Image (cartoon, helix red, strand yellow):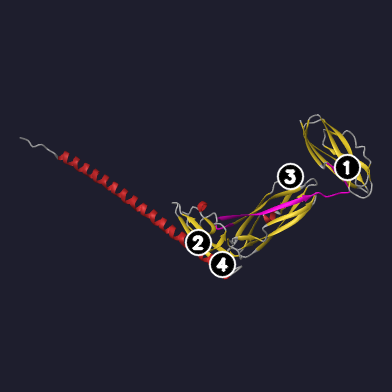
Amino acid sequence: MKKVKRKNWSHGQTTIELLLLLAFSMVALATIYSLYSDQLILAQGSKDASIARSTVQKIVDAANTAYLSGKDSEIKVFVEIPESIDLSNSQIIGRSVILQLENGTDIIGSADVEMVGTFKPLTGKYNIYLRYDGNVVRVEYRDFEFNKQGISAFVSQGGDSLQSFTIRNNSDSAMNFFIDTNFSHSLVTLNIDSSNNNFTLNSGELKTVDFNFETDATAYGNYAGTINVIGEQNDINTLKRLYVSVESYLQISDLMIYPRTISESVSGSHSQDYSICNHSSTSITIDDWIDLNDPGVNFGGDPSVSSVASYDCENFTINFTFDQTGTLDANLTASYNDGNTYTTFMTFDVS
């Protein structure tokens, strides 16, 4: 009787066993890798928590030291904010310093004095200055600073006002600066020379930035906005805003026409009532009426007023007709007393 050969069967069994062994090995490696990754995450979390505790304690200790040292005392501390810190939920409030970890855990420290300030909106390492002003400890950053908190100017209608502020680089190395504005008004402009748009200051250097407000003859009231200064250093941008405003006040002339300016939506024709008033102690004679207008705006003749008594007003009406549509401008000027003039302005949105 012939023996049955089982060579192929033994070979197949060996292959299956090798595949099973490989599969078990991969599962084991995956488990080990997962456990290793979890340990790394836990270790990093523990490290970040330790760094956060150190930072909180440094701030608290510095605040207490500045407080105990008396008014105008200042302490500089070097801190580190880990990347895993949730800055949106971290704060300096009252006597507490709070850094929140990404898992929601709060690292909290408490000082012996009230504090005012915030964390920078970025992680990393930087210096914090804690200054006791006699009431509270203020948390400040000396990347750069202005010599003014804000600028307010008072200008008569049609006038201008030259202003300035100073930037100081308080950091330990050079810093690039970029300046733009957020001041959008049709009757008042804020002008900064282009040489101030981009410049570099070394550590401790100062630069004075000049700018001016220009007001239209019809500008009246308060016009506000900001000058935005960006300091760039080590690929990190810090934005600070200088708040600016200008008050354009009415310039009283001996002779004035009211309303001083109008803006009307009209169709075909428009009737407008005016008053011309004498603010002086003597009678004023009107030498001439001068109208200036876009094509398509037609005045119905000059006003009939030829003189205005002291501290008195005269009324008149102008009947306008329009040959065009769109936004059309016009003005009317009274000429009096040795060439002095006063003008009223009009804008018509003609449909």
**Residue wearing tag 4:** 67
How many marks can you see?
4
State the residue position of label 2: 110
What is the CA distance from the residue labelled 3 to the residue labelled 2? 51 Å
- Please give the label number shown on residue 173: none
Amino acid residing under circle 3: Ser
Q: Earlier in the sequence, mark 3 or mark 2?
A: 2
Say which quarter of the image contains residue 300: top right
Proximity of marks 3 and 1: CB atoms separated by less than 8 Å:
no
Give the SS element for disc 4.
helix
What label does residue 186 carry, if any?
Answer: 3
Task: Name the amino acid type tagged 1.
Answer: Ile
In the foreground, 224 or 190 = 224
Of labels 4 and 1, the one closer to you: 4
Q: Main secondary structure of the magenta part?
A: strand
Q: Residues within 10 Å of mark 3 (few under 14, many from 20)?
A: few
> Which of disc 2 and disc 4 is earlier in sequence?
4
Query: Residue 189's spot in the image, x, y percent?
Result: 73, 49
Looking at the rendering, the stretch of residues picked out in magenta corresponds to: 232-258
Q: Is residue 340 magenta?
A: no
- The N terminus appears in which quarter of the rendering? top left
